[in-house]
Image (cartoon, coloured by chain):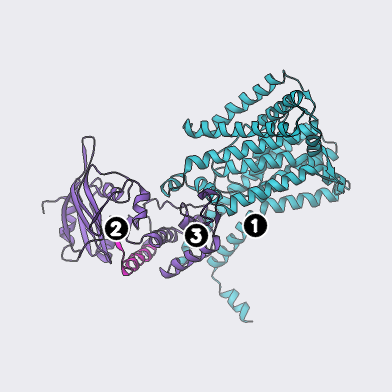
Chain colours: A cyan, B purple
Amino acid sequence: MAEMAKLASIAPQERRYRWLHAALLGLRAGPALILLLLVVVVTLTTPVFFTSRNIGNVFSQTAVIAILGLGQLLVIVTRGIDLSVGSTVALSGVVGAIVFLHVHSTVLVILAILGVGLAVGLCNGLVFVLGRVPHPFIVTLASLSIVRGLALWAANGTLIPGMPHAVDTLGGGSVHWLPYSFFVVVGLALLALVGTTYLVWGRWLYAVGGNPDAARRAGIPVGRVLVSVYVPSGLAAGVGGLLTAGLLDSGSPTAGDLSELDSIAAVIIGGAAFAGGRGNVGNALVGAFTIGVIRNALNLHNVNAFYQLMAIGVVVLLAVEGDVIRGYVETRVRLARAMREDE
Amino acid sequence: MTPVLAVRGASKRFGAVVGLDAVDLEAHAGEVLALLGDNGAGKSTLIKALSGALPLDRGVVEMDGRRVTLHSPADARDLGIETVYQDLALFDNLRPADNFYAGRELATPRRLPRSIRLLRRGEMAATTRTTLDRLQVRLDDDGVVGLLSGGQRQAVAVARAAAFASRVVILDEPTAALGLRESRRVLDLILRLRQEQKAVIVVSHAMDHVMEVADRALVLRRGRKVGELVPSTETYAQIVSLIVGGGA
C-alpha cells in the first residue's frame, strides 16, 4: 500500500527521467543484446548453426576481423582511424612467404610477419604525429595504397605458396572443434582489456579521445599516446596476416582486401563512438561476431556473397543510427537532471 | 602577512598591443580576490601567466615571498596552483574520478614507466568521493561527466582543482554559463574553498556574484591596474566606473 502511494506521488518529471535512464541503459547494452537475439534467431531458423563444427567455423572465419577490430578499437577511441590494416595483412603474409623461401626458420618467418605489421603501424603513427597531418584518415589511406602496392610488387602479383607447419596449424588447425585462432583472439582480447582498463596508458587513450586539448593541458603526452595506438593496430594486422597466411599456406598479395572496413564496422557495431572516447574490448568483439554470425548464417542459406556485403552495410547504418539515438537520449537525460535539481 | 601568491610588475605585449603593463597582484590564504575588467582588459592574460600557460615578458612571481618560475601548466600545478578554465577542460566521456586524476593517475609500481603502471582505481575513486563529499558536491550517480547538468559539471571541475590545489585556485568565469540556482551552488563552493584557507582568484563579469564572495577586487583596464578595493554596496558604483573607465 505504502509503495503504491509512493509510486503515485512520483512527479511525472521524475517518471520521465527514470524512463530516459532505462532507455539509456538499454542502448548501452544494445550491441550484446542484438548479437544474442541474432544467435537465437539463426539457431531457430538454421538447425546446423548451433553445432560445434559450425561454431568452430564461425570462430575461424571471424578471428581475423576480431583481431583487426581490437587494434582498430584503440585507434578509434583516440578519434583516429586505421585504413591500412587490410593491406598490412597482405604484405606481412607475402614477406613471410618470401622469407620462408630463403630460410626454413619458423621463428624468422613469424618475426618477419609480425615485424611488417609493427613497422607499418609505427610509420602510420610517426607520420601522423610528427608530420602534423590533420587527420589519420589521410595517412592511413596513403599507406593502404602503398602497402598493398608493395605486397603486389613483392609477390609479383601472385600467390607465394608455402608456410612453416606451425603457422599453418595456427591459422587453420583446431583443438577438437575449437580453432587455434580462437585462442589467439582470446589472448589478444585479454591483453587489450588489461591495457585499456587497468593501465595508465588505457586511461590516456580515453582522455585523448574525449578531449585532446584538456589532455594536453593535464600533462598527458598526447603525441606519444597517438603513436602508441597505431603500433598495436599494425601489430594486430601482422597477427591477422599470420593467421591468414597459415590458413592459405601461402602469402597472398590480395589477402585482407576490404578487411579494414570489416574491422571498422566491427568497432562501430560494437557501439564505439566514431568521434572518439567511447568503446570497449568486449563490445568490439561483439561487433566482430555480429558480422561473423550474419555471414555464416547467410552462407548456410546459400545466400549470394553480394547480398552479404549489403547486409553488413545495413547493419553498420543501424549501429550508427543507434549511436545517434543514444546521443539524443543522453541530451534528454542531462536536461531532465538539470530540471530535477531545480525541484 | 606574506601573500601566498604575488606578482610584481607583470608585463606582456602581443606585438604592438599591450596585454599587461606593470601589474601587481597579491593573493592571500583564506581570501577571495576578484579580478575585474572589461573585455580585453588583461584578465585572461594575467591568469594565463599565473597558471603557467603564457610566459610574461617582464615581472616577478613569488610564492610565500620566494621567487618562482612558471614555464608550463605543470610548473604551476607542482607549486599548488590549479586553474579552472572557462571551458572546464573536463573529459565528458570519463567519470569524475578519472577526470580528477587525468594526467596524474595514481598507479604502481613506480619503477615502471608511467604509462604501463597499474591504475589504483579504488583509491582514486575513494579520494574523489571524499573530496566531493567534503565540498558538498552531490552527483546523481557515478556515471560519466558528460551526463551531468551544467552546474554539476562546473562543480566537478572546481572540486578537481580544489582537490589538487594546495595553495591557489584560479577560477575563470565560474558562473558565466549557469542558471540562478546552479550559480548559487558554485558560489557556496567558492566560499568553502576560502574556508579551507586557499587563496582564491576569481575572474568574473557577474558583479553581484563578485560583491557576494570577494574580499578584495582588483580592476584592470587596458592592461593596467586601475584600482583595488573592497567590494561593498558603497564601492559598487566606483568599481563599475573603474571597469568601464567612466571618468572616476
Q: Residue at x 60, y 31 (%)?
A: A120
Q: Position of residue A76 (x, y in %)?
A: 58, 42
Residue B199 falls inside the magenta stretch: yes
In this rendering, the answer to whether B237 lies above or below A188 is below
Residue in front for this viewpoint, B76 or A270? B76
Asked whether disc 1 touches disc 2, contact meaning CB atoms under 8 Å apart, the reply is no
Q: Which residue does the numbered mark 3 point to in the structure image?
A: B97
Q: Which residue does the numbered mark 2 point to in the structure image?
A: B202
Do the dots labelled 3 and 1 sit on one chain? no
Subunit that carries the residue with mark 3? B
Residue A342 visible in the shown view? no
Q: Nearest to the eye among marks 1 and 2: give it.
A: 2
Q: Which residues are the magenta region?
A: B182-203
**Spatial separation of the CA atoms under disc 3 and disc 1:** 24 Å
Residue B26 falls inside the magenta stretch: no
- B231 vs A291, left or right, is left
- A302 vs A97, left or right, is right
Inspect the image, locate mark 3, and give the three-letter code of the amino acid beneath it.
Ala
Inspect the image, locate mark 1, and give the three-letter code of the amino acid beneath it.
Gly
Q: Which residue does the numbered mark 1 point to in the structure image?
A: A26
**Spatial separation of the CA atoms under disc 3 and disc 2:** 25 Å
